[in-house]
Image (cartoon, rainbow, N blue to C red):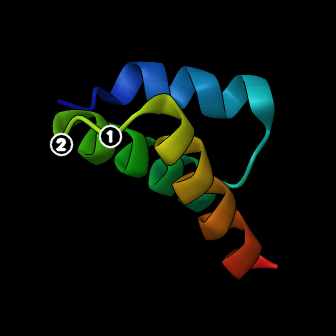
Amino acid sequence: MIFRRPLLDAWCESGEDLCILLRQVMIEEIATNFDFSEDDIEEMISRHLQGMV
């Protein structure tokens, strides 16, 4: 489960766009749930970020 307070803390500390941060967390949570490797998760996040440019 994604908790609000840790997300808000991370958002305040990083100053990153909240939508981007939420998408990254959702990718990580879903991929972890389906037992993707850390390398696969990093690749998914990098592909996501490339689409944001």
Residue 52 image point, x, y percent: 72, 77
Above/below status of 39 relative to 50: above
Q: Residue at x 34, y 30 (%)?
A: 4
Q: Secondary structure at mark 2?
A: loop
- Please report contact status of discs 2 and 1: CB closer than 8 Å, yes or no: yes
Asked if residue 17 lies left or right of residue 6, the reply is right
Q: Which mark is residue 34?
A: 2
| Depth check, front residue: 39 or 46 | 39
Question: Which image quadrant is residue 46 in?
Answer: bottom right
User: Residue placed at 32% from the left, 40% from the top?
Assistant: 36
Quarter of the picture holding the C terminus = bottom right
Marks counted in the figure total 2
Coordinates of residue 48 in the picture (x, y in percent): 60, 67
Residue 24 at what x, y percent from top left? 52, 49
Distance between the alpha carbons at the discs numbered 2 and 1: 6 Å
Secondary element at tag 1: loop
Determine which of the numbered discs, if any, sits on residue 36 in the image. Answer: 1
Describe residue 5's horizontal placement relative to residue 9 as left or right: left
Task: Estimate the x, y position of residue 28 in percent, counting from the top left.
Answer: 40, 40
Q: Amino acid at mark 2?
A: Phe
Residue shown at 44%/41% (left/top)?
A: 25
Circle 2: is it few (<14), some (14-19), or many (20+) Cα within 10 Å? few
Q: Which mark is residue 22?
A: none
| Quadrant (top left, top right, bottom left, bottom right) of the N terminus | top left
* Crowd band around label 1 with a 10 angstrom C-alpha radius: few (<14), some (14–19), many (20+): few
The quadrant where residue 6 appears: top left
Left or right, 6 with respect to 42, comes to: left
Q: Amino acid at mark 1?
A: Phe
Residue at 47% across, 50% down: 22
